[in-house]
Amino acid sequence: MKKKALETRFIADSMLGKLAKWLRLAGVDVEYEKDIDDKELVQRAIWEDRVILTRDRSVTQRKLVKECLLINSEHLSEQIREFKRAFELNTLKNAFTRCILCNNPLEEIPKELLKGKVPPYIWNTHERFKHCNLCKRIYWAGTHRRNAEKLLKELIEEKGLTLKTD
Ligand SMILES: [Zn+2]
């Protein structure tokens, strides 16, 4: 049985920034810092009980590493496939619940608080907004529309997939 991606915590190495963003888009908890070195990566994985995602074989051979997935491809779509061969990710129920920049869970924010902070067209045509209380980025349905479509395509292309959109 594959571990469920949505019930697992991850930390990605510095070469996997794009993959980290995509997984966050799907709601997966993935820590990522651009300049993290191998030693720090391994330490954080231990302290925070996270599975390491890495493109660096030498990381996988470090003694302290408990659980880790070596990603071979440098292309995002193949990286997603590699990830899904190792972890179960076949639902979109948690998609768009996490800030793609900070990995922080998004919170609903009352529309009245956002007047003047989002473009008037968006304010007039949307009722529900979420925000990240770390970077203050505001999200609304459509923020990630194009990304979402690509993500959906990636997920659907996988053979034998059942999509739950509840
Ligand atoms: Zn954020």
Image (cartoon, rainbow, N blue to C red):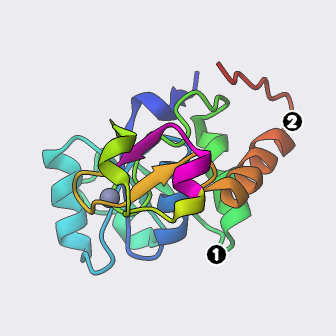
**Considering depth in this image, is 152 or 78 the residue closer to the camera?**
152
| Amino acid type of the residue tagged 2 in the rendering | Lys
Badge 2: residue crowd in 10 Å (few <14, some 14–19, many ≥20): few
Element on which disc 1 rests: loop
Q: Is residue 109 left or right of residue 72?
A: left
The answer to whether residue 138 of the structure is visible from this angle is: yes
Ligand 1, what quadrant? Answer: bottom left
Residue 64 x, y percent position in the rendering? 20, 54
Give yes or no for residue 123 being in the magenta stretch: yes
Q: Earlier in the sequence, mark 1 or mark 2?
A: 1
Residue 146, quarter of the rendered image: bottom right
Where is 37 relative to 3, above or below?
below
Q: Residue at x 36, y 61 (%)?
A: 137
Tally of numbered discs: 2
Mark 1 vs ligand 1: CB under 8 Å?
A: no
The answer to whether residue 106 of the structure is visible from this angle is: no
Q: Residue at x 29, y 47 (%)?
A: 113
Q: CA distance from mark 1 to mark 2?
A: 22 Å
**Considering depth in this image, is 4 or 143 the residue closer to the camera?**
143
The region drawn magenta spans 122-131
Q: Is residue 161 left or right of residue 68?
A: right
Q: Residue at x 52, y 43 (%)?
A: 96
Badge 1: residue crowd in 10 Å (few <14, some 14–19, many ≥20): few
| Amino acid type of the residue tagged 1 in the rendering | Glu
Q: From the image, which quarter does the N terminus lie in? A: top right
Residue 63 x, y percent position in the rendering? 23, 57
Where is 8 relative to 122, above or below?
above
- The residue to which callout 2 is attached is 159
- The residue to which callout 1 is attached is 74
